[in-house]
Amino acid sequence: MFGYVFPDKPEMKIKEFELFRAYYCGLCKSIGRNCGQVSRFTLNYDCSFLSIVLSSLKGDPESIKPEKCIAHPLNKRLMVGESNVLEYVSYINIMLSYYKLLDDYNDEGSIKHKGLMIPLKPAFKKALKQYPKKGDVITKRLDELSAIEKSGCKSIDEAADPFAKLTGDMFMYEPLCTDENTKKALSWFGYNIGKWIYIIDAYDDIEKDIKNKSFNPILLSFCYNNEKAIDFKNKVKDNIKFTLTYTLSEVGKAFELLEIKKNREIIENIVYGGMYKKTLQIINKGEKDK
Amino acid sequence: MKDPYEVLGVSKGASEEEIKKAYIELVKKYHPDQYRDNPLSSLAEEKLKEINEAYDYLVKNKNGESGGYDSYNGGNQYGGGDSNFNEIRNLINNGEIVRAEQMLDSMHTKTAEWHYLKGIIGMRKGWYSQGYNDLQTAVKMDPSNFEYRDALNKANNSNTTYASRPYGGGYNRPNNTGADMCQVCSWLWCTDTCCECMGGDCIRCI
């Protein structure tokens, strides 16, 4: 379900995209350092976005250096140097990835997922030790989520709620939550990001889930009645498009209330451009197949 | 008080015109209407207060008169209807969303007003899909009610404002109305065809 949060690249300045990538690469290195080299494959753009937003709430300039990277052996890549934020996000990333694999394993019981979990286990345990409170929040919310999914929930809002709350909590990195206002704004920012990720992922999976007869909150909450996928999508399109756009407009409102000290252009591009374009792209996908 | 220039995002030597322009932009951005039914409304109010103070300070310092925007008096004032609904409206105004929703859920007859209030609560607590549905239902049940239509319009406007906001360097807009290369080509082709109709030729090779 990860990787939807990405910039609107064509509208970005090259230096901004370089910086975006420097955060991504820096985070990847940080994961390697803190959680072991194998854990690096779990990195996704959503966590990279988390690290940019949190870093941007701090005023001090980032140290950016070209470094070697195993995935790009020929050229050195620009990377943001290690920081508390990157370390925090790398542990969050590992916890989320591990639980995602566990969830997939419980759903499908495939050996592939179990196999991927084994090398992550030591890093996962270390992460739980470093951030026990965040670990508790993740387990609690994911338990809520699977209970809702099992009960055959009839509301997309209710189904999206636990993951949204989880994301909101991940954005509340304690050292940065020095006052009530930042805390409130960050949590609402994250809540809506999480909500958007959950719903857009569900919408994107409609065809697949109809075919495999697997759980999909949108199929349940809009009473799927064995019609063709395309007809069903047309039925729910207006509501889902409104919901996703409104969620993003709330992300925007929360963003305007954050005291962003750097990287404003990059975050604006993602919040107002990249995520909105992704929404339109996913909503309008399959239009031509009619 | 924070540095008023910083609050308004203008440079130290900015002219009154520039200050005014920046001020109006910021008031639009943080206007209570933008944050209606939003849990961050009190933060936006604070921000607006800061902006008003900064503007008052700068403008008063220059020519001693006080500045424009009347400070917003907080909360959405809902009014009218039967006593149960009035109590629920009061709860919503005071931000007691959970209790308001409990009261609403315990009612049996679902009138247009019921759906409207349920919709307002949905939008406020982040349950937009249901909120949108309820607001639509309220409008459908009572199309002549201004309050219900207004709430639905506000929600839609929030999306439009979001979708048309320029970002990054500010040279782009998501719903770009400018011409792309295809359009330019087709204009040229049209011009040429028209010219040929009239006996002339604009571009020889096509």
Image: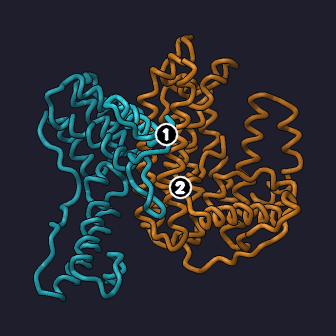
Chain colours: A orange, B cyan
Frontmost of labels 1 and 2 is 1
Can the viewer see residue B127 in this picture? no
Q: Mark 1 is on which residue type?
A: Cys
Q: Using the image as rendered, state which of residue A181 and residue B150 is in the foreground.
A: B150
- For disc 2, the marked residue is A11
| Residue at 28% in and 27% down | B107
Q: Position of residue A289 (x, y in %)?
A: 58, 20
Q: Mark 2 is on which residue type?
A: Glu
The image quadrant that residue B53 belongs to is bottom left
Q: Above or below — where is A12 with respect to A197? A: below
Q: Chain of mark 1?
A: B
Q: Above or below — where is A237 with respect to B56? A: above
Q: Position of residue B131 (x, y in %)?
A: 36, 35
| Residue at 44% in and 55% down | B172
Q: Using the image as rendered, state which of residue A47 and residue B123 is in the foreground.
A: A47
Is residue A17 left or right of B4 when viewed as pictured? Answer: right
The image quadrant that residue A171 belongs to is bottom right
